[in-house]
Structure formats: C-alpha cells, structure tokens
Amino acid sequence: MWAIISGILILIGLAGTILPFLPGPPVALAGLIILGIATHFEKVGAVAISVFSALTLLTILFDIFGPALAAKGYKSTGYGVMGALLGAIFGVILLGPLGAFLGPFLGAFLGEILAPKAELHTALRTAWAAFVGIIIGTLFKLAVTLSMAAYFVISLFK
C-alpha cells in the first residue's frame, strides 16, 4: 500500500514539474521518503534521500534565482537582474501559478525599462534571458524528478 501512495506522489511530482501550481520535486521527494520509512530504509536508503533532498533544494533555489542568473549572464543591468529576482518572488505571491512564469519575465523587462538610459532592445533581451532561465529551471526540475521516479521504480525490484 505504501508503494502505491509513494508512486502516486511520484506521478504528481512529475506533473508538478510542468504545472506551476504543484511543487513537483518536493512532492516526488515525499513519495521516496514515505517508501523509505515504510520499508525501514531498505528500499530507499538515507543516502538516496539525502542526495535527492539536496537536489530538490537546488531546484527550489533555481526557481527563485535562475531567471536573475540567466539575465545576468546575458549582460543585463543590475536593474534587470533585480527585476527578474523580484518578479520571481512577487510573481508567485501576486499571480499564483501564472506568476511563476510571468513574474521573472515581466520583472526583468520592467527593471530594464525603469533603468536610467533604458532601451527597449535591452529590456526585451533581459526579459528573454529571464524566460530562458525559467525554461532551464523547468528542465532541471524535470531531470531531478525523473531521476527520483527512476530510482523509485528500480528500488521496487531490489
């Protein structure tokens, strides 16, 4: 029964990597932790849980800071980088799931437009960079969650 509950959480976690209203990797991690506890850590060990916990934390941090880092990588001004960071945080707070995608993009754009000597081209480039950061973060979340799903399936046959 615990394997079924864990499997359902893994599937929800996989869906959550794409759907912004579900925290994908943390839900999948919960599935692994439940299976670990239910099997006295014979199927899923403490080391695996520790590694996947660290990776899950990285996905959360990248969700917050990734768009700003991507904007910085595109040589955006500090205004655009700060706008992307604030957009990532306040986008989710104000717009919910939609804000996870729109917040960093709009924040980076507005940050650049409000900067001294603002140029539309720079603002659009910065917004695009923030969007690329969102996509990279989503792909990273997907990779981590798929790794957890694969580990789950393999651990069932141990």
Image (cartoon, rainbow, N blue to C red):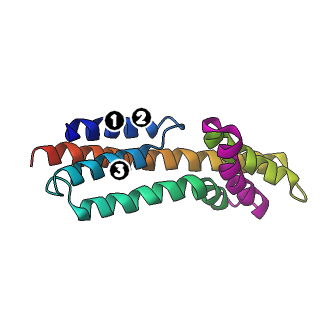
Nearest the viewer among 50 and 76 is 50
Q: Please, what is the three-letter code of the amino acid marked with disc 1?
A: Leu
Estimate the x, y position of residue 134 in percent, counting from the top left.
Answer: 57, 46
Q: Earlier in the sequence, mark 1 or mark 3?
A: 1
Answer left or right for 99 relative to 49: right
Most frequent secondary structure within the magenta stretch: helix
Secondary-structure class at tag 1: helix
Q: Which contiguous range is marked in magenta?
A: 73-98
Estimate the x, y position of residue 153 in percent, counting from the top left.
Answer: 19, 42
Q: Residues within 10 Å of mark 3 (few under 14, many from 20)?
A: many
Nearest the viewer among 73 and 156 is 156
Q: Residues within 10 Å of mark 1 (few under 14, many from 20)?
A: some
Q: Which mark is residue 11?
A: 1
Question: In the rendered image of this protein, does residue 30 appear above or below residue 5?
Answer: below
Mark 1 and mark 3: span between their CA atoms?
11 Å
Nearest the viewer among 74 and 113 is 113
Estimate the x, y position of residue 115 in percent, counting from the top left.
Answer: 86, 57
Q: Residues within 10 Å of mark 2 (few under 14, many from 20)?
A: many
Q: Which quadrant of the structure image shows residue 146?
A: top left
Answer left or right for 154 relative to 111: left
Mark 2 and mark 3: span between their CA atoms?
13 Å
Q: Please, what is the three-letter code of the amino acid marked with disc 2?
A: Ala
Q: Which quadrant of the structure image shows residue 78?
A: bottom right
What residue would you read off at disc 3? 29
Answer left or right for 47 relative to 154: right
- In the rendered structure, does residue 103 fall within the stretch colored magenta? no
Q: Which mark is residue 15?
A: 2
The answer to whether the residues at label 1 and label 2 have Cβ atoms under 8 Å apart is: yes
